[in-house]
Image: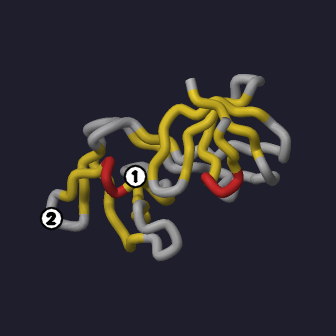
Amino acid sequence: MNRARVTRDYRTQYANPIRFAQGEIVTLGARDTEWPAFIWTITADGNEGWAPFDWLKPLGDGRAEATRDYSAQELDVDAGDEVALHHDIGGWWWCEHADGRRGWVPVEHLERR
């Protein structure tokens, strides 16, 4: 498994991160200008947040079907922490901290080992 060292602190930006399951139908908003791989997404329960556009299959009416499970959970990390890297998309890595916590961290906060 790939590992990385955290080069600077990162703190979660959203208190209630969006989550959806493969096959779930969501409503699509605008693409993110800073992180273009992501699109504003609203789940059936009304939760909103950024989701990877490539993990959604547009249905043509402002809605899309999720092609895989997703959680926008970010990971609070401190400079010097070590994390395991699982997968990346659009400038973010899904990481696992040594204490078992998991979440997204921006690539610019990480130095691969």
Vertical order, 14 against 21 (above or below) = below
Provide residue 59's location: percent of width, then percent of height. 16, 58
Query: Which residue is at a point 43% across and 61% down the rendered structure image?
Result: 38
Query: Which residue is at a point 33% across and 64% down the rendered structure image?
Result: 28
Q: Quadrant of residue 98?
A: top right
Q: How many marks?
A: 2
Element type at mark 1: loop
Nearer the observer, 36 or 110: 110
Provide residue 23's location: percent of width, then percent of height. 26, 38
The earlier-in-sequence mark between 1 and 2 is 1
Query: Which residue is at a point 37% across and 50% down the rendered structure image?
Result: 44
Left-right relation of 59 to 41: left
Nearer the observer, 70 or 89: 89
Residue density around tag 1, few if under 14, some if 14–19, many if 20 or more, within 10 Å: some
Q: What amino acid does circle 1 point to?
A: Thr
Residue density around tag 2, few if under 14, some if 14–19, many if 20 or more, within 10 Å: few
Provide residue 85's location: percent of width, then percent of height. 58, 34
| Residue at the disc numbered 2 | 60
Give the number of the disc on residue 43: 1
Q: What amino acid does circle 2 point to?
A: Gly
- Farthest-out residue, left: 60
Provide residue 97's location: percent of width, then percent of height. 72, 30
Tell me, yes or no, whether the two marked residues, 1 and 2, touch with CB atoms within 8 Å.
no
Q: Quadrant of residue 108?
A: bottom right
The residues tagged by marks 1 and 2 sit, at their Cα atoms, a distance apart of 17 Å
| Residue 48 in view, yes or no | no
Q: Quadrant of the N terminus?
A: top right
| Residue 47 in view, yes or no | yes
Q: Quadrant of the C terminus?
A: top right
Left-right relation of 56 to 41: left
